[in-house]
Amino acid sequence: GGGGGGGGGKAKPPSGIASLMAEEQRRKEAAARREAEDKAAAAAAAAAAAPPSDAWLTRGIVVKCLHKRLAGGRYYKQKGTVEKLLDRYSAHVRMHASDDLLQLDQQDLETVIPKEGARVAVVGGEHRGTTATVRSIDMDAFSVVVRLEDGPRAGAELPLEYEAVCKLDSR
């Protein structure tokens, strides 16, 4: 006769133990995937909750436009005041010379450092969100010494980089 059970080319079904091991492996991989997704979601939520230190635009500050091609360069190096934030990185800026209202991105703007005695908004670092008065300017170190007007360290005098402060509009 013909063929009894001598391995006629078909794979035999996995034994009970092999089947349990494969199932356990699939369960572990699924759990690892879920854990990785949870970690990624938690990191994204934390990033959304904490304002990034690179966003410095604030209502009421005087900024300088660095956009060379806008309106044929008409606004390049011109100053304006941030009137309204559209998101963390863009704002409506009222230009001082022309009174035009422009929508500009932070990357096309720079902070303005006023003369000694003028008020500034602290737009970067641990004192972000406070106001201060410029006590002195160190052009060689690109920094200013300010006296904080509000916040937990009101009255303190400390050095800050140019990028951390911006002139407040007094007009």
Image (tube, grey):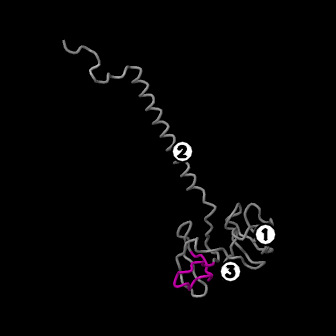
Give how far apart the Cα atoms at labels 2 and 3 are. 46 Å
Residue 109 figure quarter: bottom right
Residue drawn at x 41%, y 28% as measured from the top left: 23
* Magenta span includes 157: no
* Magenta span includes 81: yes
Q: Position of residue 116 (x, y in %)?
A: 78, 78
Residue drawn at x 66%, y 78% as measured from the top left: 169
Within-10-Å neighbours for mark 2: few <14, some 14–19, many 20+? few
The type of residue carrying mark 1 is Arg
The type of residue carrying mark 3 is Ser
- Closer to the chain start, of discs 1 and 3, is 1
SS state under label 1: strand
Residue 47 figure quarter: bottom right
Magenta span of residues:
64-83
Is residue 82 shown above or below 154?
below
The residue furthest bottom is 98
- Closer to the chain start, of discs 2 and 3, is 2
Give how far apart the Cα atoms at labels 1 and 3 are. 18 Å
**The C terminus: image quadrant:** bottom right
- Locate residue 131 relative to residue 101 in the image: left or right: right
Q: Which residue is mark 3?
A: 170
Q: Which residue is mark 1?
A: 147
| Foreground of the two, 91 or 3 | 3
| Foreground of the two, 140 or 11 | 11
Q: Which residue is mark 2?
A: 39
Give how far apart the Cα atoms at labels 2 and 1 are. 41 Å
**The N terminus: image quadrant:** top left
The type of residue carrying mark 2 is Lys
Within-10-Å neighbours for mark 3: few <14, some 14–19, many 20+? few
